[in-house]
């Protein structure tokens, strides 16, 4: 499963709000909404976001193992 939890922590640490990201930095609001719901985005989008936030992909995304039912 994809999680963008690191993104929200990075934004908090850098004191960047979603408003700033969208309206002052030009990041797409729909894409940010998708990320809030842990939907996938392209590597190009990650590249843009990392450029805006001056960070690495590890500061934006993490992969969590899918939970499997016990047998």
Image (cartoon, helix red, strand yellow):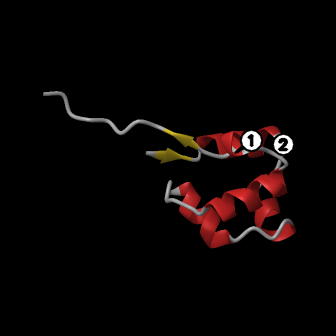
Quarter of the image holding residue 32? bottom right
Q: Badge 2: how crowded within 10 Å, few (<14), some, or many (20+)?
A: few
Residue found farthest to the left? 71
Q: Nearer the viewer, residue 65 or 13?
A: 65
How many tags in the picture? 2
Q: Badge 1: how crowded within 10 Å, few (<14), some, or many (20+)?
A: some
Label placed on residue 10:
1
Across and down, in percent, residue 24 comes to 86, 67
Q: Residue at x 55, y 63 (%)?
A: 34
Q: Is residue 2 above or below residue 31?
A: above
Residue found farthest to the front? 43
Q: Is residue 35 left or right of residue 71?
A: right
**Real-space CA distance between mark 2 and mark 1, rounded to the nearest whole angstrom:** 6 Å
Across and down, in percent, residue 60 comes to 67, 46
Q: Is residue 69 left or right of residue 43?
A: left
Q: Residue at x 79, y 61 (%)?
A: 21
Mark 2 and mark 1 residues within 8 Å of each other at the beta carbon: yes
Q: Dot 2 corresponds to which residue?
A: 14
Q: Residue at x 58, y 47 (%)?
A: 4
Q: Is residue 15 above or below residue 22?
A: above
Q: Residue at x 13, y 28 (%)?
A: 71
Does residue 40 show up?
A: yes
Q: Is residue 16 above or below residue 40?
A: above
Q: Is residue 31 left or right of residue 27?
A: left
Q: Quadrant of the N terminus?
A: top left
């Amino acid at each position: 499963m994809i999680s963008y939890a690191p993104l929200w922590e990075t934004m908090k640490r850098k004191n960047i709000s979603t408003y700033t990201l969208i309206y002052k930095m030009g990041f797409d609001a729909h894409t940010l909404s998708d990320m809030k719901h842990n939907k996938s985005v392209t590597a190009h989008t990650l590249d843009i976001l990392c450029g805006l936030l001056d960070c690495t992909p590890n500061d934006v995304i993490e992969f969590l193992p899918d939970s499997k039912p016990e047998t």
